[in-house]
Image: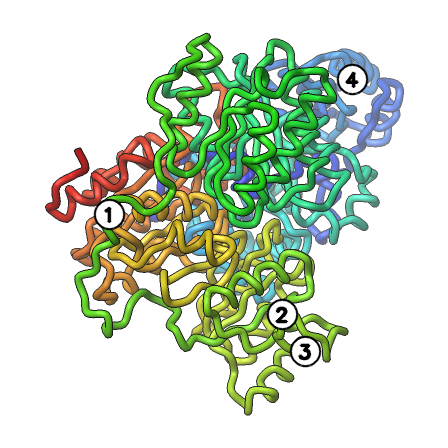
């Protein structure tokens, strides 16, 4: 089968790829059995004596398998073969005491030793590029599927599945037949694969794998081994299944066993619904504590600290407008790590996180620990919403702080210098926060259409308008001149939010506006209700939907995108801040309050696309300060599946006369950069592109991310580390810079202009 890419390890960009909940083999077998797929007469036990009883029931040779959430069982001695019940008991006793890769067995699985005639492979995974499930089948099971794909591609069949419809037998048949299987085997395998695919869909799985799927000597077909992973975001609606499997609500099944620091941060995060904090210290061994955010800013700042010789003690993310308690809790957890005496508090320009709240939180942490904030906080660099109020607090305690005129890299350098004892500092000198030098250049007449997707007369609604964040977002958009014609919150009809009428349904909004559907919608409802809200918008005839909500189960997002494609609608997001055409209109919280948005976003000629909301504003502010300005900036979303990719938005920028160059912010993981590179090559793009790649620190061996299983690696192709993405972009003629503050000169060089002195 030509075109099947080689296998790799997927990169996990610190929470920006869907988090996986893993299952022990005995649990995966139960999920497979519930789907109607035949399994062996196995038994799970936690006692060697019970293992003997299961072996006696089986009445023949058995296999004793350690139940651990790690690989390498066979090599470590965690899989043993027994001919008698007594031997099974002895092996079980040994295996139960055997630690594998730091994991103590949950128990052992006692399995009959099957008489196998033929081994097959079957799995369902997410194809992130196509944004749908992918069914994989091979007639060469029992070995690594990536090896089969590499050496025998004609023995692997693939079939993409709809996200809106349940998997069908004909789709399974096509996958089996593509691998060269026919006759009785095909007819017996088809219903098994269909049931596996439906189990994948129904249970919000990231991976459902049977290897081997065996045909026994008696002609029956059984699953001899199974591997299942569930999306963490879907645990809530799969609670009944998890309870049936005996999995507690607070049981962590992530790829990485959390440290004490990580558990502390998770508890702080879970105690308060406002905002989000994350902390990780696996692979970090330094002495500079980091209180940084949010997703893209954290990746960028960690790179920056390491690039100037700093040694981070941890990685963290803070954002989403957290409370004082949450900011304080994260700072205290970092400061209580061994060897940490100093922290750097830094973020990209914030829109929906208040600078004063974070300032109060980190000051509170220092005081509660009996530490002097001025000596403990090396630098505080968080510009944006409520920054003046925040800076007043910091001045009161003598904390050195910077606004947006100091770049992320310069702030990181200053923090490292202070930790090393350089009190005078190097290059971090505050400059004017206003756009510098000259006004952003415009090559087209003032009457020419500017930007893409939104215009001055674009109308939109806000779904979930009465929520705390939505109320702020509505005010910010109105102040920027947006035409919000209604809001939707079920049960709140008749109310107003900043003068915007609230309705129960979109249909009521349409009726209120004379039968005219709004052009767009900003969706801010909770994750469990987002799909329904987006479906309502699409079916009401709305063409542009900005989904702000994050942590939506992947299946829901894929269904939203599939329906949008069917109806000709465009989705931006999820997990995004929206889009802005400077001086014209904005949809979403991008840029924050109108006065802050005006600082970062001035009309110009550079289009910006970013997977990180905060970095959209950071990059745009840098372009504005350099006199280049922005034509349109789009926060495309940081989730594994999003509605509009770089390549899908490029034709719009190509058609926009105002846009003369493109800047993208990107990270490890996913295939969007490969798509963009291919699009540029195929379409002879007129627009020069400059890229900034964050998360380079993740390329180290200690930072290798989680894999979604062997099948998932086939889907994604070459390993999408930062280094390999950079190489791919450069091959397409896209320049990749190492620092945000290098972007303006790179763009000017592309446009044939003189760089700043």
- Residue highlighted by disc 1: 689
Task: From the image, state whether disc 1 or disc 3 is nearer to you.
Answer: 3
Relative image position of residue 293 (x, y in whole percent):
53, 36
Residue position marked by numbered label 2 in the rendering:
498
Q: Which is nearer the N-term, disc 4 or disc 1?
A: 4
Residue picked out by circle 3: 503
Of residues 403 and 141, which is closer to you in this image?
A: 403
Q: Is residue 82 left or right of residue 17?
A: right
The residue depicted at 69 percent of the width and 28 percent of the height is 364
Decide if residue 126 is on the left or right side of residue 408.
Answer: right
Q: Of the residues under marks 4 and 3, which one precedes in the sequence?
A: 4
**Which labelled disc corresponds to residue 257?**
none
SS for callout 2: loop
Question: Closer to us: mark 4 or mark 2?
Answer: 2
User: Which is more N-terminal, label 2 or label 1?
Assistant: 2
In x, y percent, where is residue 90?
80, 12
Mark 2 touches mark 3? (CB < 8 Å): no
- Percent x, y of residue 547: 54, 60
For disc 4, the marked residue is 92
Callout 4 secondary element: helix
Q: Residue at x 42, y 10 (%)?
A: 422
Q: Quadrant of the C terminus?
A: top left
Q: Earlier in the sequence, mark 2 or mark 3?
A: 2
> Mark 4 and 3 residues: CB-CB less than 8 Å, in contact?
no
> Could you tell me if residue 217 is visible in this image?
no
- Residue plotted at (83% across, 27% down): 45
């Amino acid at each position: 089968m030509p075109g099947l890419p080689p296998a790799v390890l997927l990169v996990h960009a610190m929470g920006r790829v869907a988090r996986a909940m893993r299952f022990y083999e005995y649990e995966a077998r139960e999920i497979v059995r519930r789907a109607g797929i035949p399994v062996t007469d196995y038994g799970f036990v936690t006692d060697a004596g019970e293992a003997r009883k299961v072996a006696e029931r089986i009445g023949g040779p058995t296999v004793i398998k350690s139940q651990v959430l790690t690989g390498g069982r066979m090599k470590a001695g965690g899989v043993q073969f027994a001919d008698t019940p007594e031997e099974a008991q002895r092996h079980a006793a040994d295996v139960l005491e055997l630690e594998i890769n730091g994991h103590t067995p949950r128990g052992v699985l006692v399995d009959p030793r099957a008489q196998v005639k033929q081994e097959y492979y079957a799995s369902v995974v997410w194809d992130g590029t196509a944004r749908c499930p992918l069914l994989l089948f091979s007639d060469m099971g029992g070995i690594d599927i990536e090896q089969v794909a590499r050496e025998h591609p004609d023995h692997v069949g693939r079939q993409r599945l709809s996200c809106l419809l349940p998997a069908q037998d004909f789709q399974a048949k096509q996958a089996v037949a593509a691998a060269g299987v026919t006759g009785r085997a095909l007819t017996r395998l088809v219903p098994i694969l269909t049931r596996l695919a439906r189990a994948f869909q129904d249970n919000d799985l990231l991976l459902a794998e049977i290897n081997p799927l065996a045909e026994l000597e008696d002609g029956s077909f059984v699953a001899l081994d199974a591997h299942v992973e569930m999306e963490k975001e879907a645990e809530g609606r799969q609670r009944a299944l998890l309870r049936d499997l005996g999995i507690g609500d607070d049981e962590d099944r992530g790829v990485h066993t959390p440290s004490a620091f990580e558990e502390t941060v998770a508890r702080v995060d879970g105690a308060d619904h406002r905002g989000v904090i994350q902390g990780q210290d696996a692979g970090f061994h330094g002495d500079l504590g980091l209180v940084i955010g949010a997703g893209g800013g954290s990746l960028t700042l960690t790179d920056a600290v390491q690039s100037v010789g700093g040694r981070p003690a941890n990685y963290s993310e803070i954002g989403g407008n957290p409370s004082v308690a949450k900011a304080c809790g994260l700072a205290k957890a970092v400061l209580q790590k061994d060897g940490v005496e100093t922290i750097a508090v830094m973020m990209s320009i914030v829109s929906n996180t208040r600078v004063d709240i974070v300032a109060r939180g980190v000051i509170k942490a220092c005081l509660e620990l009996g530490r002097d904030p001025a000596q403990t906080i090396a630098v505080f660099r968080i510009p944006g919403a409520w920054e003046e109020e925040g800076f007043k607090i910091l001045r009161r305690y003598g904390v050195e702080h910077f606004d947006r005129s100091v770049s992320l890299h310069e702030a990181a350098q200053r923090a490292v210098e202070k930790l090393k004892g350089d009190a005078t500092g190097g290059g971090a000198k505050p400059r004017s926060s206003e756009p510098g030098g000259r006004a952003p250049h415009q090559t087209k007449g003032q009457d020419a259409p500017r930007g893409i997707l939104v215009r001055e007369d674009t109308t939109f609604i806000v779904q979930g308008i009465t929520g705390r964040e939505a109320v702020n977002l509505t005010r910010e958009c109105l102040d920027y001149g947006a035409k919000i014609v209604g809001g939707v919150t079920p049960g709140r009809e008749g109310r107003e939010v900043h003068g915007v009428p609230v309705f129960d349904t979109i249909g009521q909004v349409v009726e209120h506006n004379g039968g005219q559907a709004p052009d767009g919608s900003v969706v801010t409802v909770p994750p469990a209700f987002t799909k329904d809200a987006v479906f309502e918008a699409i079916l009401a005839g709305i063409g542009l939907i900005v989904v702000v909500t994050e942590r939506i189960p992947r299946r829901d997002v894929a269904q939203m995108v599939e329906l949008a494609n069917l109806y000709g609608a465009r989705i931006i997001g999820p997990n995004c801040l929206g889009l802005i055409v400077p001086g014209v209109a904005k949809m979403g919280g991008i840029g924050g309050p109108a006065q802050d948005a005006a600082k970062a976003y001035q009309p110009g000629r550079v289009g910006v696309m970013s997977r990180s909301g905060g970095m959209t504003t950071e990059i745009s502010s840098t372009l504005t300060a350099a006199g280049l300005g922005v034509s349109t900036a789009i926060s495309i979303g940081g989730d594994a599946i999003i509605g509009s990719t770089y390549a899908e938005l490029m034709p719009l920028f190509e058609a926009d006369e105002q846009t003369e160059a493109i800047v993208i912010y990107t990270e490890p993981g996913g295939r969007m950069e490969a798509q963009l590179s291919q699009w540029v090559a195929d379409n002879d793009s007129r627009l020069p592109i400059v890229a900034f790649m964050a998360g380079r620190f993740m390329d180290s061996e200690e930072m290798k991310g989680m894999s979604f299983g062997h099948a998932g690696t086939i889907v994604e192709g070459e390993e999408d580390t930062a280094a390999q993405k950079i190489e791919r972009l450069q091959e397409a003629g896209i320049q990749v810079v190492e620092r945000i503050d290098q972007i303006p000169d790179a763009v000017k060089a592309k446009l044939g202009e003189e760089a700043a002195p």
